[in-house]
Amino acid sequence: MTAKIINGKAIAVELRQEIAREVEQLVSAGKPRPGLATVLIGENPASQTYVRAKRKACAQVGIESFSYELPATVSQEKVEELIRRLNDDPKIHGILVQLPLPAGIDGERVLRAVSIEKDVDGFHPINIGRLAQKGREPLFVPCTPAGCIELLKRAGAKLDGANAVVIGRSNIVGMPVALLLVRENATTTICHSHTRDLPGTCRKADVLIAAIGRPEMIRGDWIKPGAYVIDVGINRIEDSTRKRGYRLVGDVAFDEAVDVAGAITPVPGGVGPMTIAGLLRNTLRSAKRSQV
Ligand code: GUN
């Protein structure tokens, strides 16, 4: 079997076009333009790249972005003071604090300082807590996990009653995507470094989500024939045939998996573009909500 390739890049382009149209409708109706504050602390090159990409995407859909860059040596108090100022600023509808934060900054306290109404990343403990509870609704859902579910649905996966296996239990992807799968009535297993029989557990998955950050760890013979495979990993591996000296691979050995899975996301061009689209959508929603 050759899997259907789930084209996250194309789906994200469609989503961005819809968002751009809605932003223009809002502004033409005399409402304030949606605004996103990006907070980048320290000089992590990957974080700098992600924030740049997020601000560029904002500009493309007509969302105004406001950049705040602080040195890694900034005090906890200064960071929280900035967040409080952004919470009170009516031009700002979403606050994105790029993670990871430098050592010495208490991330939990920073995320808790963000108003839940502006928590477009969905990382505030109240939003995550609501996501975990039956009958409660978070104001925002984390962007990468929401993107995974959207890709599965658009690819035609039936989540109700499916066996879903999530590999990885991070706060940013693994745990929230597992919570979303439970909300979709999937029977959900979360695997991690202490899982005894990882290949055997993966082989039972109708839906497999890999979010571990280990290049090509999930092999083709770990995959149930016909399964839906979502690869969240973005790993650099050396490649002297490329001008830049490396290439990007996922957590799944794509060339093996593509012969077994029913549908699979590529890396790059799968989940990645959906994360930014989700952030734009959350910022637009926040702007609309602030005006009712
Ligand atoms: N670091 C890695 N992924 C994310 C994300 O989705 N949001 C933020 N704020 N930081 C991240």
Image (cartoon, rainbow, N blue to C red):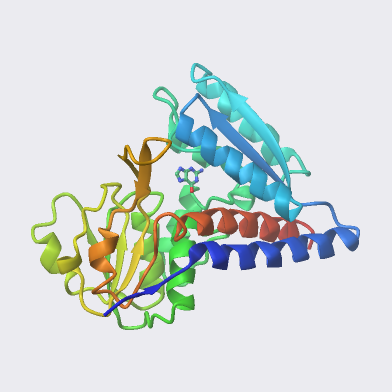
Up/down of 155 relative to 251, above or below? below
- Residue 88 location (% of width, % of height): 72, 39
Give the answer, above or below, for where 96 lies relative to 101.
below
Instruction: Tell whether 274 sits left or right of 32.
Output: left
In the figure, is residue 257 to the left or right of 10?
left
Q: Is residue 269 left or right of residue 114?
A: left
Q: Is residue 156 above or below residue 238?
A: below
Residue at the spot 34% in from the left edge and 56% down from the top edge:
175
For this orientation, the residue located farthest to the top is 73
**Residue 159 falls in which quadrant of the image?**
bottom left
Q: Residue at x 41, y 49 (%)?
A: 172
On the rendered image, what quadrant is the C terminus found in? bottom right
Is residue 219 in view? yes
Count of labels shown?
Answer: 0
Expressed as whole percent of the image width and height from the top left, the position of residue 126 reads 49, 52
Quadrant containing the N terminus is bottom left
Q: Is residue 219 left or right of residue 245?
A: left
Query: Residue 208: horizontal and vertical position, in percent?
Result: 29, 68
The answer to which quarter of the image holds residue 65 is top right
Residue 142 visible in the shown view:
no
- Residue at the far left in the pictured view: 196
Nearer-the-camera pick, 137 or 100: 100
Q: Residue furthest front?
A: 241
Which residue shows up at 21% across the image and 53% down it?
Answer: 217
The front one of 90 and 151 is 151
Give the residue drawn at x 38%, y 83%.
Answer: 158
